[in-house]
Amino acid sequence: MRKPQERSAPYWSALGCVLSVVAALLFQAAPTRLIEGITIMPTWPLMVIFLWSGLRPYFMPPIAVFAIGITQDLLTGAPMGIWALSYLVSISVFRFRGEDGMPRDLPPIVLRFGGTLLLAQAIAFSVGFFALGEMPHLQPLIIETIASILMFPMLAFLAVRRRRGSRSGFIGG
Amino acid sequence: MASRRTARHDAEHGVRFSRTIFIMLIVVSSALIMFDRPASRSVAFAGFRASFTDIAAPLLELAAQPIRAVKGIGPYFRMQGDLARENAELRQQLIEARYWEDLAYRQRDRIEVYESALNVQTQATQDRIGAWTVADPRGPFVHARLIGRGRNAGIADGYPVINLYGLVGRVYETGERSARVLLLTDLNSNIPVMVDRSNSRAILTGDNSEYPRLQYLGRNPDIEAGDRIVSSGDDGVLPRGLPVGVAVPTRDGGWRVELYSDQAPIDFVWVWPYVPAVIPQREEAETASAEVETDLPAPAETAPVEAGDTAQPATEEGGQ
């Protein structure tokens, strides 16, 4: 039996999902290098996709993951399809499949995200090698990976905390 | 209500990742990667990308505002001592710059005299187009920036982009209101350069690292560490003499360039609407010279006007 609040319209959650995706994409492309000293950039879109696919799987169908990947490709100037393909494959491999979706403990979430991230970066690297005809620069990928692994637990902690607070989910619903 | 509950129930218990759609999207992604490779990108794909950036540019511009604000706050937190020292250095540089300014004006006047004597139509005096960086995505694949001005402002593919310190890159994928700038560090960037001191030619090739490579220098290149590297203009796309950077030797005996444009974050840039001088057809040139010879005995009119400035070249010609 669901609680009354679970039956409420998930519009706020949907809005939160859309806003977080847009913010992640914008921040990924934003000229943050203008600020001296800040040159690291985690893969915000993958974090958002991963969290929402665990919290509200029906907000992250394959077409949404594909659209986010393509948008990132276009914003970053990369050949279209690189990030779309890597996100699709990595999320499909590591997404939470249980009835409860994402667990409420942090370590398994972080571990699973680590796997998703590594697979996504590996696919992006190899596909990028094919698309460019030259070896992509490894350093930005490594920096992105490390920054993402460092940053993700904070976001995951917030998500899990909200999830514990309201049984149904993340924001709103 | 019931249908919504059913939909949610279904979504959370099973139909989350449709396998058919997933496979279809994998195929679409692979096809896009095949057809959107930078080396063989079609006009349609380039147009689509430019249209997308046109749409995204205002949003990116909006998102960049807070970052610019944070950048402005930074100097307030610097040590006062540093500011005082910096101020003194700037004053010293200003004094030196006055000398160069005076020299530049004199050279400009001199060039104008030469141009009028030779009847040269140069593009060098065209106004540069200022533009803000609205997106600065980083990644392993492409080193490019998105600027918030496009064809509407007179920007076109191939135009060189410079900042306060030197050459940044050149324009590609120009939209109506936005354009992408391919940085010198990008894998696809190859520009002809030369050593300012010795005029040794080379190709500056980006490899997505911070220091692009100098290639095709020859067997015994006349280059030393710290030499100033400038664009040679050999390709006819970039003007000659744009400052690029400083030569840096590598451990394997090669050379790389520390870019001048990296001295500060690339926030505001100028796009130079440079149109290379077109070499006139031989026949046209000969016809024109024949007309000049037959129509007028011109040297007597022009010679006294530039007597002071053209005396030396005239002497040299006479000597030869």
Image (cartoon, coloured by chain):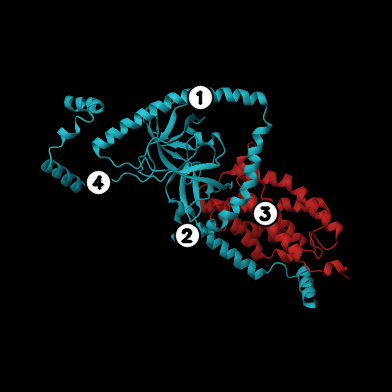
- Identify the mark nearer the N-term, 4 or 1: 1
As drawn, the label of residue A104 is none
Disc 3 packing (10 Å; few <14; some 14–19; many ≥20): some
* Chain for numbered disc 4: B
Which residue is identified by label 2? B47
Q: Is residue B9 above or below residue B114?
A: below
* Amino acid carrying mark 3 in the image: Ala
Mark 4 lies on a secondary structure that is loop
Are both tags, 4 and 1, on one chain? yes
Mark 2 lies on a secondary structure that is helix
Disc 1 packing (10 Å; few <14; some 14–19; many ≥20): few
* Amino acid carrying mark 4 in the image: Pro
Location of residue A144 in the rendering, given as x and y in whole percent from the top left corner? 65, 45
How much space separates mark 3 and mark 4, taking CA atoms?
A: 53 Å
* Chain for numbered disc 2: B
- For residue B314, side relative to residue B83 (left or right): left
Image quarter hosting the C terminus of chain B: top left
How much space separates mark 1 and mark 2, taking CA atoms?
A: 45 Å
Q: Residue at x 49, y 46 (%)?
A: B182
Location of residue B157 in the rendering, given as x and y in whole percent from the top left corner? 43, 51
Q: Residue at x 24, y 35 (%)?
A: B117
Which chain is depicted red?
A
Which residue is identified by label 3? A23
Disc 4 packing (10 Å; few <14; some 14–19; many ≥20): few
Which residue is identified by label 4? B280
How much space separates mark 4 and mark 1, taking CA atoms?
A: 43 Å
Which residue is identified by label 1? B93
Query: Are the residues flagged by discs 2 and 4 in contact, CB closer than 8 Å?
Result: no
Q: In which quadrant of the rendered view does residue A31 lie?
A: top right
